[in-house]
Amino acid sequence: MLTGKGGTGKTRVAAALGLASGESGRRVLVVEVDAQRSALEEAYGTTLDYTPRKVAPSVWAANITFEPALKDWLNRTVRAAKIVGLILNNPMVQVFLNVTPGARELVVLSAVIGHLENFDQVIVDMPASGHAVSMLGIPDTAHRLMRTGPIHERAGEIMNILRGPDTALGIIALPEEMVVNETVELYARLGQILPDLDVPLVFLNRCAAPTMTDDEHKLLARLSAETDLSEEMKELLMAGRWDAELERATADSLGRLHSEIGVTVVPFPRLGVIGGFEGGPVKVTQQMAGALRRRVLSEASKDGA
Amino acid sequence: MSFEAMLEANRLIICVGSGGVGKTTTAAAIGLKAAKEGRRVLVLTIDPARRLANSLGLNQFGNEETRIQLDNDVEGQLWAMMLDTRSTFDALINRVSPDAETRERILNNRVYRHISDSFGGSQEYMATEQLYEVVNSGQYDLVVLDTPPVKNALDFLESPGRLVQFLDKRILSWFLAPYEEKRVVGRLFRGTSALVFKLLGYIFGREFLDELAEFLFIFRDLYDGFRERHEAVIDLLSKPGTTFSVVCAPNEPSVAVARYFLEELSDRSMPCAGVLLNQMHPTLGESIEPSAVLGERIESLSRDLSAHTASQLLARLGANHRRLLGMSQAEQALASTLKQHLGPGQHMWQIPRLEREVHDIDALGKIFELVNQV
């Protein structure tokens, strides 16, 4: 499962992780959770719906929406098709499901987890931080509130999977102070509501590795302090300071994530945008998958040594 | 319309947009600007994350309205508040309960406690409730509302409808019929309805249905109050002095979300001032050759530094600037695309990216210094 502050590139990381993971030959499914507008479609350059669709050899993708998930849920729990139809078409039941808070989320989570039966790995692009936390708390609440019946049982199963050894959650962050603050906060809140959930990774998106020398920093600062700069000079120096700032923020963020939550941080380099966003979103997904692949290879060689 | 005129003309501004576009920061900056104009302003967020506090450089604050310390020469006032679902729910119950006994019964009902505490979507249920309270308290000249990212923002628009739908008498009487006296059961519950109810019991567990019924029994008499409040909120949202404002960053996903919002708001006949396009990279629009522009100066400033520092930095600045220019061109292209989707009377305001991240009042005050209408 992947979550993080909005705008951090969660969906792109999920998409790239799917491609990189599928290369090992295992059957991988990448899903969005009840997305009104699918963002995964853009990342893979194809249309998606509830039924998994192949997007690369050994990689499938889907958008798990409520209505078909409910139908699946009812088929699973009630079984008789005629009765399922009766429930689905009853306007009172529709209202009941729409307004019972949490029902929607539980049904969708159940469908996501159901896919573990057909795939070796399911990668979930969860909602943004706060809403992911509420969603992950729902099975436990439902389990306690509905003390008998299929919801009680299914919520229990979902909780066991969330807590189990084969489930992990990764947080996507950016090298920005506010985003790192929220990541640290999110990590703590996840620990409170689901202490058994494994949260081993933070993906730090759009990083710049530190390549500027101290002397370059010094020189840039001296130039910036000059008083009689032309507009062109100012613009050049501003461009320089932005990139220098990104290098500094990358180092700061890596340091803080290590010291404040102590997880493994996987940095993604910022991708080239010279001449605009050339190659489009699908290219970005592929480049990010490439970065993951190189990391896996280099770690494998380190282990070998 | 200038940005200032838009601020001036409204008493309630609702910021919508996708995540990560600077919505909360923009809402806080709007609040600060209006406070500096001498108005009494409240910035309200229904985002479960503590972003507003972050933006204002505060550690955190709860469901209380908290006054933000501004410079002494500022005439207006800036207040901030984050919605805490549970306290808002409890305040609502206090307000609508006819007597202390009813209030205690609701507050102690297990279904109520779970719904108000932890079920997803409750934040949105309660948002409009709080909004109505603060707008009508008469304490503020302007209320700025920051909403959660896309899907939930729409829930927020629909939440009064959803809550009232739950309490609709027709639905309540269907659901509560088996709990009424026996004769009612005999009359209403035959055939399909009885079967469906039995199935609901099977799916949700009979015990849950019983507790839910108790919860609804208590709430039943409050329906008229909710309906009135719902209508008042819809009225508040559509009347002059209220405007939605779509906040957007110059990247493809958030522009797509902004277009979606423009359409949704127009379909719902909600007033919308237009788009605030944040984080634009300002450039002169021409390529610049670093050595031609900075060559002489850089030599004299780098004599005491290690060899090649000047040439390395010049090469680096060239690459940095090419990236900036490329980005700026792509951003302007996105801006023109988005501009074509503005309706009549709607505007687009571009806000240049600041050099530093915004996490204190000073930086917040700079956001709208360079705003320009396009």
Image (cartoon, coloured by chain):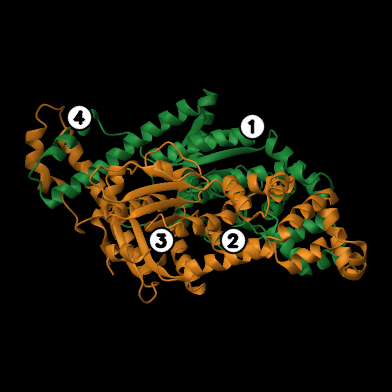
Q: What is the three-letter code of the residue carrying label 4?
A: Asp
Q: CA distance from mark 3 to mark 4?
A: 48 Å
Q: What is the three-letter code of the residue carrying label 1?
A: Pro
> Which color was chain A given?
green
Q: CA distance from mark 4 to mark 1?
A: 47 Å
Mark yes or no: residue A300 visible. yes
Mark closer to the observer (2, 4): 2
Of the 4 image quadrants, the one containing the N terminus of chain B is: bottom left
Mark carried by residue A195: 1
Whether pointer 3 and pointer 1 mark residues with C-beta atoms closer than 8 Å, the reply is no
Give neighbour class at mark 2: few <14, some 14-19, many 20+ (Cα, 10 Å).
many
Residue B266 position in % (x across, y down): 47, 73
Residue B245 position in % (x across, y down): 40, 63
Q: What is the three-letter code of the residue carrying label 2?
A: Ser
Looking at the rendered structure, whether the residues under marks 2 and 4 are on a common chain is answered as: no
* Badge 3: chain ID: B
* Badge 2: chain ID: B
- Which chain does orange denote in the image? B
Whether pointer 3 and pointer 4 mark residues with C-beta atoms closer than 8 Å, the reply is no
Label 2: state its secondary structure: helix
Whether pointer 3 and pointer 2 mark residues with C-beta atoms closer than 8 Å, the reply is no
| Residue at image location 54% in from the left, 67% down from the top | B232
Q: CA distance from mark 2 to mark 4?
A: 57 Å
Mark carried by residue B159: 2
Mark carried by residue A148: none
Mark yes or no: residue A175 visible. no
The residue under label 4 is: A215
Which residue is nearer to you in this view: B178 or B279? B178
Q: What is the three-letter code of the residue carrying label 3?
A: Ile
| Residue at image location 66% in from the left, 65% down from the top | B224
